[in-house]
Image (cartoon, coloured by chain):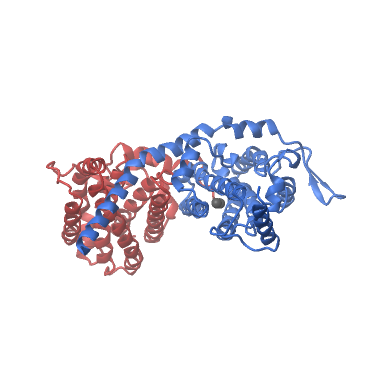
Chain colours: A red, B blue
Amino acid sequence: MNNSLYIYLLLLGDNSLILGHRLSELCGHGPNLETDIALTNHSLDLYGQVRSYYQYAAEVKGEGTEDSIAFLRNERQYYNVLLIEQPNSDFAHVICRQFLWDAYHLPLMRSLMKSKDDQISAIATKSEKEASYHLRFSSEWMRRLGDGTEESHAKLQAAFDHLYPYSFELFKETEIEKEMKENGIGANLSLIQTEWKKTTESVFEEANLKLPDTPPALTKGKQGIHTEAMGFILAELQYMQRAYPTMEW
Amino acid sequence: MTQKEISLEEQFQARIDRGESIEPKDWMPEKYRKTHIRQISQHAHSEVVGMLPEGNWITRTPNLRRKVGLLAKVQDEAGHGLYLYSAAETLGISRDEMFEQLHTGKAKYSSIFNYPTLSWADIGTIGWLVDGAAIINQVMLTRTSFGPYARAMVRICKEESFHQRQGYEIMIGLSHGTPEQKEMAQDALNRFWWPSLMMFGPKDDESPNTEMSVKWKIKRKTNDELRQQFIDITIPQAEYLGLTVPDPDLKWNEERGHYDFGAIDWDEFWQVVKGNGPCNKERLAARNKAWDEGAWVRDAALAHAEKKASKNVSKVA
Ligand SMILES: [Fe+2]
Ligand SMILES: [Fe+2]
């Protein structure tokens, strides 16, 4: 089995899984019906991506299924970035987390559309449309909250101060990502970062956000070292598979 | 009432009797307007509150396929809420006013959503029984006299039957599964059977609204007729699953061509309607929390839109 490719697929899929989970927690609790429906749509898109990545990962590994990969790993075997697992503290955190990630996800998908791996390229082609819609949605909300009222601006700035330092992990290349880049399967994260900066800087400006002067967060999500929140995410996510092992649903 | 009003009302009734659809701008008796605002908004509230018990299992679905199915279903219910609020708005009430009525406990919603979802099988059971019962009520409403309501129902019914099939399919999986899964399915049926029968409302002789409702084609069948129809459809489905409906008096009556069934606990029904069900307080609290915590977000969106609009105006000028 190609272990590097397998881990690379998890690096891609786990972000969608955990962000999809965070968004799914909000279903039925949004500020109005329209945003509730939109964020549930995001979550559905992300789970669609998760299934494609994990089905392919199971094929690469030669064992397991999308579900054993999604539900039956231990915490240290999930490789999502820490930005993604940050809690839904309020709507500003939800939007800001989404925006910081969308602005990375879209150029990532555009780059992976050219991957030498046909399946990754096919998944990226499908996800690109979704990512582009998600980025439009979160940018609009960044502007709305940043420009709307004093309160909304203060809340967005607070969310931004908290989340921005986590965004650097997206571009911190791991050994696997380096290997995948070099053999034409993976993306070049420094190019993605350039795109990310372009997109985000103009929106930060329109939303009147001040860059926090804190250094990049100390993050090892891609190495499977998570925040304390992750254990609780997995406790819910894995509940049925752990309580009723090996059953069909 | 003046002579003129009487004749307007007669003409109005004649239109309904001819099967014409009443549109928002048409003349209508005040009572017709009020009744429809009440019924449609209650229906909308039921869709929205109904998202909560099923939403309770979204983060804990047993696999990814079920995750996507449940998310999509709960999202559909939000969409149903939207269509229905829009239909009610055509009668001169705002969505905010309707929410206000819901959040203060003034407006009702379907009592079934005041029961808790305690296991994954409850999600299957709700799809099977609750969406199933909703379809029986709603198919009738696709031909109701008020146009926007009838049209909303046509769209909604298509999705509800999908929900019902999805729920029943979950139940088929469980009832063909391990003993633990079968037990989970049976337990869910035990808890949801009677509350599902209560969804059709009080018995006919205790249901004061029925006469007017029949006249305006909001109702084409009585509560008891609909309940009977539901039972007759559902029992063979339960038998196919190998599950037992928790009613020792249930048996086929050859002469009537229907199932006979045991007495419904109407005390429980009224308790839940009056706010003392197992989850009434939690459901209202959850709706209020989402609404209150969303206030600054809605304000921000409004303020931003106004600023943008005034910028556009000054550009034009
Ligand atoms: Fe519905
Ligand atoms: Fe439904």
Q: Position of residue B90 (x, y in %)?
A: 50, 55
Front-most of residues A82 and B44: B44
Instruction: Tell me how many marks there are.
Output: 0
Front-most of residues B291 and B311: B311
Answer above or below: position of A187 versus B138.
below
Which residue is rendered at x = 31% and y = 49% of the image? B302
Task: Name the side, left or right, on which B228 lies relative to B122.
Answer: right
Answer above or below: position of B148 versus A210.
below
Front-most of residues B107 and B114: B107
Task: Name the side, left or right, on which A179 lies relative to B253.
Answer: left
Q: Position of residue A2 (x, y in %)?
A: 31, 60
The part of the image, by quadrant, that contains residue B117 is top right
Q: Position of residue A206 (x, y in %)?
A: 19, 53
Q: Which image quadrant: the N terminus of chain A?
A: bottom left
Residue A22 visible, this angle: yes
The part of the image, by quadrant, that contains residue A125 is bottom left
The part of the image, by quadrant, that contains residue A182 is bottom left
